[in-house]
Amino acid sequence: MRDSKLAFKYFYKYLKPHWKAIFLVSVFFLISTFFQVLAPTYLGQAVTKLTSYLTNGGSLNSFLEIVTLLAASYLLSTLAIFISWVIMSNFTAHANNSMRKSLFNKLQRMTIRYFDTHQDGKILSLFTSDLDNIFNAMNQAIFELIAQVSLFVGTIYVMFRINIKMALFTVLTLPLALFLALVLIKKKKARKYIGLQQREISNLNGFVNEQLHGQAVIITNGLQKQSVEEFKKYNQAVRSAMFKGQFYSGILFPLMNGLATLNFAIVIAGGTYLILAKQVSMPAGLGLIVMFIEYSYSYFQPLTQLSSLYNLIELALTGAKRLAKVEQEKEENRVIDGQQLAPLKYGLTLENVSFGYSKDREILHGINVTVPKGKTVAVVGPTGSGKTTIMNLVNRFYDVSAGKIALDGTDIREFTLTSLRNNVGIVLQDSVVFSGTIFENIAFGKRDATLAEVENAAKKAQIHDYISSLPNGYETKISENGDTFSTGQRQLISIARTLLTNPDFLILDEATSNVDTVTEEKIQVAMDEVIKNRTSFVIAHRLKTIINADKIIVLKDGSVLEQGTHQELLNLKGFYYKLYMDQMAFD
């Protein structure tokens, strides 16, 4: 029940701004319903007049007048429907657009933890599957509901006004129809399996996205068959859930169609009985039969239509529930009223910092590190020792569990998030390039940068010469996956992007770990340029890249094991000495 309320609140939030359009759509639907209900009375009268003319003779004028009114009723009903659909198509597109923008904006405000704990494919399914289901429902189901309910009520009212006995014959199957609908809806099987269907589709999208990203590894290791077998498992789960979801949500439609056909027979039999019992004349009786066959169709049409739309409505409610839950996710605390980070005077300190990604598993244990202004401090250690975790904490991707991280003695949590990140630059281990031109990629963090500024940053990053050699230079388009450049060149572009923003404090997160030795030398020259006279944190795997650091912190199992300069640590002949010697043996 709570999930249903969540879904309805979601719809209310995005449809409320369009209340005027909704009102107009409802009015035109009611106008259409009025003429749609009125038309069968003219049809019945036309049959009566025509039968009377054929039996007794006379004038056809009254018959032609009624046929004209009948045609006008159908025409006006169609016109009202057309106008309502034009209005509805416009505002449903706007509402869906608002939902899409709101979702994307929400994702931009969410914590990094959400993205670390949710597969890309599952997040994408919110945009592709859930929002599309909502759009389809708004475009086809929600206001069809208004039209069909209006038609149902209007038809019953008019039938009983015209002839009570024929009306009773027509509604004879209503209790059975309502009973079947209530039983199926009350069991909530459709909602259960539609929800499961969407979750399984989300899991399948996540798996496919993961496999596509790792396709090179799969091909290299000859794992295509295993990948296909895994896909079959996910696909089978989707097939099973989809069958049950479609079955339980769609079973109402054939049932209602069957009852509608039965109802036609009941109406004809009822009308025939009235004629044979001499309760009505032959012309009037035939007119009533034709009229109530039309009313039987109009009466059962809402039940049939609504049962066919039940699947769409359930998909939309499930999508709205999933999107509403995303909107409730925790956002980054941007500390809007916090301090503005001024240029560094003293440096950065980690004071007795402890942290764990989950409460039951601590990664860092009482870390104490000082990075004086203008100095470079390197952090080294084996995989899993907590090096990258420190970077996540300094940039406030996550907040410390205990202790504090301070810039010039002030806890970084007291600064506005914008000013903190404007002053902290990061070159990540996995370089990122975006669709667009090379110029746009380098200027990504400083949109108002001039070409001269971008070129200067590229020169310092040792990538200018290569860019200049391309036919379109800095206007060269980069494909979505960045295939225009090698891994090393993408890393140099990332370094140029960071240089352009001129951050006060810099973090280099294993920037040379994924490149060959030749490219590593280029990146090392670029890194030396980047950290020159700049307060820097260098997280390194290859120790030869940090031998000139002012201080080296050695981490192991989340604790500081050793610290000092390169030579001091070698003289200790401890853990760092062993790491360094092991690496030198392979270089």
Image (cartoon, rainbow, N blue to C red):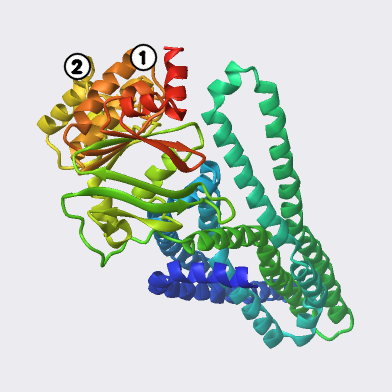
534 with respect to 136 (left or right): left
- Rendered image quadrant of residue 402: bottom left
- Residue type for callout 2: Asp
332 with respect to 460 (left or right): right
Foreground disc of the pair 1, 2: 1
Element under disc 1: helix
Q: Check disc 2: other Cα within 10 Å, few if <14, some if 14-19, many if 20+.
A: few
346 with respect to 24 (left or right): left
Which of 553/527 is in front?
553
- Residue 521 drawn at (x, y percent): 29, 17
- Above-or-below relation of 288 to 525: below
- Rendered image quadrant of residue 21: bottom left
- Residue 369 drawn at (x, y percent): 34, 45
What is the number of callouts on the image? 2
The quadrant of the image that shows the C terminus is top left
Q: Check disc 1: other Cα within 10 Å, few if <14, some if 14-19, many if 20+.
A: few
* Residue at mark 1 to residue at mark 2: CA–CA distance: 19 Å
Name which residue lies at 68% across and 56% down.
Answer: 194
In the rendered image, which residue does mark 1 sit on? 517
In the rendered image, which residue does mark 2 sit on? 465
- Residue 519 drawn at (x, y percent): 32, 16
The quadrant of the image that shows the N terminus is bottom right
